[in-house]
Image (spheres, helix red, strand yellow):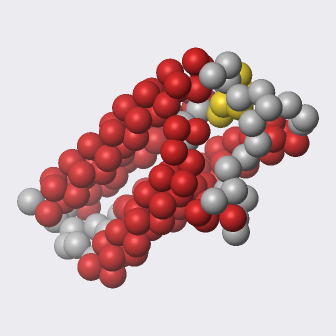
Amino acid sequence: MAFILFISFIILQRLSELFIARRNERWLLSQGAIQYGREHYPFMIALHTVFIGAIIAEYLWRGNSQIDWLFLALYLLALSFKFWALASLGKYWNTKIYRIPGVYPVKKGPYKFLKHPNYIEVVCEVAIIPLVFHLYYTAVTFTILNAIMLWVRIRVENKVWATKP
């Protein structure tokens, strides 16, 4: 029952992020934003979708894995950091890379101290979420795949923000 509640929460949280991203996308486009990184975006969506499927599959394959309270606490801590990062970006946050001409990166919240705090949080999430139920194969596999994805994405994002508006 704990796993069903946990994975349901993860799925609802991810869907709510997509809803917020879509709402923010409409606002960004109304402000003249330009999208970058279209080529890698479908792979990122596929990675995160398969990640959820892999969590479920490994849990079913392993049997009734018990919850690890330490990793659950770490996940909740990472999630609170994520909320801080996303709230700091406000309407500028999106799952896609957008830039409004003449607008510079947000420099408040964790963005005062770190260049990519949301990506740091995503790295933590991908590693920690499976470990809440001892799903080691999923944790290792998707940590590596996510690192590759973020290597591509951060290069695109850094290039976008390095150019003059």
Quadrant location of residue 74?
bottom left
Q: Is residue 30 left or right of residue 105?
A: left
How many numbered dots are placed on residues in this image? 0
The quadrant the N terminus occupies is bottom left
Location of residue 131 in the rendering, given as x and y in whole percent from the top left corner: 37, 68
Extreme residue in the right direction: 164
Residue 27, image x, y percentages: 52, 25
Vertical comparison of 74 with 24: above or below: below
- Report the residue at 54% width, 54% height from top: 88
Report x, y in % for residue 145: 59, 49
Q: Name the one closer to the observer, 107 or 58.
A: 107
Q: Residue furthest left?
A: 1
Answer with the quarter of the image where residue 130 lies.
bottom left
- Is residue 125 visible to the viewer in this orientation of the structure? no
Q: Quadrant of the C terminus?
A: top right
| On screen, residue 133 above or below 153 | below
Residue 107 percent location from the top left of the image? 69, 56
**Which residue is at a point 60% across and 55% down the rendered structure image?**
119
Q: In which image quadrant can residue 143 be found?
A: bottom right
- Is 105 placed left or right of 161 in the picture? left
Evaluate whether residue 149 shows in this view: yes
Q: Is residue 37 left or right of residue 93?
A: right
Between 23 and 52, the residue placed more toward the observer is 23
Q: Residue furthest bottom?
A: 70
- Residue placed at 70% from the left, 22% from the top? 34
Horizontal relation, residue 155 to residue 9: left or right: right
